[in-house]
Amino acid sequence: MLILAIVGGLATHASGDDLPLEPVKKDPDNQQPVPDDWRPTLRAIVGAFVRKDFRLAQPIPNVAPVSSETAKQIREYVADYGETLVELTDATWRRSVCQWMETHWDLLVDLETEEGGVSDLVLEAKVFEAPDGYRFEIEMVYVP
């Protein structure tokens, strides 16, 4: 459940993080913050990665299965990075972005580690409109 607070005329999260609520936008010319509606799914994806489930053996609603090649790339890149992934916190949303590409959104989500907080590692994904909301496809994890 999303709890909202009104601060200075803007709707914000009740968690006190002072981030404004982010709607889904189709702006092909500018990057946008990650919409609030997508954040629970992205937290679930990263939670699976934290548990080293890079193939998403436990399916996540509206997330496409991850190929064995993509899972291998993610596993190896995270291992080579040398730090321990942790669940996403609100700090992630200050740096993560998406951009409308006319048929889908390209998405970059900053990952966090136990050793350093928000890291240079990003999750790259595509988000498509679907009849029941949105469909997520994981592309890779890397340092841009």
Image (cartoon, grey):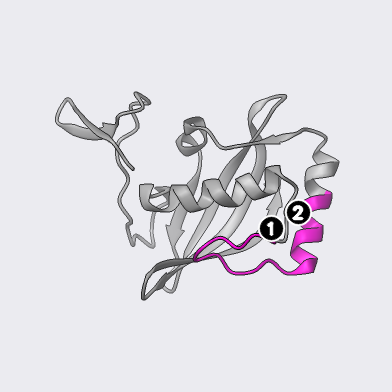
Q: x%, y% of residue 116? A: 68, 25
Q: Residues within 10 Å of mark 2 (few under 14, many from 20)?
A: many
Residue at 79%, 58% (x, y): give it: 73
In the rendered image, which residue does mark 2 sit on?
74
Q: Residues within 10 Å of mark 1 (few under 14, many from 20)?
A: some
Q: x%, y% of residue 120? A: 67, 37
Q: Is residue 71 magenta?
A: yes
Q: Which mark is residue 51?
A: none
Residue at 33%, 26% (x, y): give it: 18
Q: x%, y% of residue 49? A: 69, 48
Q: Are marks 1 and 2 in contact (CB under 8 Å)?
A: yes
In the rendered image, which residue does mark 1 sit on?
140
Q: Nearer the viewer, residue 134 or 56?
A: 56
Q: Residue furthest left?
A: 9
Three-letter amino acid code of the residue under disc 2: Ile
Three-letter amino acid code of the residue under disc 1: Met
Q: Earlier in the sequence, mark 1 or mark 2?
A: 2
Structural distance between the alpha carbons of marks 1 and 2: 6 Å
Range of magenta residues: 56-76
- Would you place residue 19 above or below residue 96 in this image? above
Residue at 59%, 69% (x, y): give it: 64
